[in-house]
Amino acid sequence: MVPQIETSYYRIARGTTLLSYVALLATIGFGAWFYGPAGVAAKLALWLLAIAGLLLVLPGLIRGSKRSYQWLCFILLMYFIWYVQAVFSFGSGDVMPEQVQSMADVLRVSATANELTALAFTIICFCAAMFAARGKQ
């Protein structure tokens, strides 16, 4: 077998993938903690259920396996669909940021900001994982 030479864009893509992966886990945890059900056990269960798909590829990502990057891309597509649906469900009937009048309105607007942040980390992680998988070839 021919040894693989790591290119500089692979190292950048791997670092970006891992950084955005951890940021996505943290953003999902933040959403589960502040916008989830009451009780610590329920919040923890919600967070673990929400990140279960991402945890499947964690050992391979740590090793730098090409297949793990590819599977991460497939898994991130589900998260992308979820967050796009959540962001677009903030429709015209909801409160816009300039119309905030109560604490419930603040929570709704900040929940949408959390979903936008998670969507951004999902897109960044997807693109970086694609570059990392390509760099492993």
Image (cartoon, helix red, strand yellow):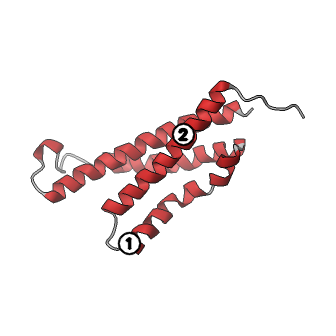
How many marks can you see?
Answer: 2
Side (left or right) of 20 relative to 15? left
Rendering coords of residue 43 (x, y %)? 39, 68
Q: Residue at x 17, y 44 (%)?
A: 97
Using a 10 Å C-alpha cutoff, classify the residue at mark 2 as few (fewer than 14 neighbours), some (14 to 19) or many (20 or more).
many
What residue sits right under mark 1 in the picture? 40
Q: Residue at x 12, y 49 (%)?
A: 100
Q: In this view, does 27 lie above or below 134?
A: below
Q: In this view, does 110 lie above or below 37?
A: above
Element class at badge 2: helix
The tag earlier along the polypeptide, 1 or 2, is 1
Quarter of the picture holding the N terminus: top right
What residue sits right under mark 2 in the picture? 126
Rendering coords of residue 50 (x, y %)? 47, 60
Q: Is residue 128 above or below residue 105?
A: above
Rendering coords of residue 99 (x, y %)? 11, 46
- Gap in Å between the C-alphas at discs 1 and 2? 30 Å
Kind of residue indicated by mark 2:
Phe
Q: In which quarter of the image is residue 103?
A: bottom left
Q: Check the image and name the residue furthest to the right.
A: 1
Kind of residue indicated by mark 1:
Val
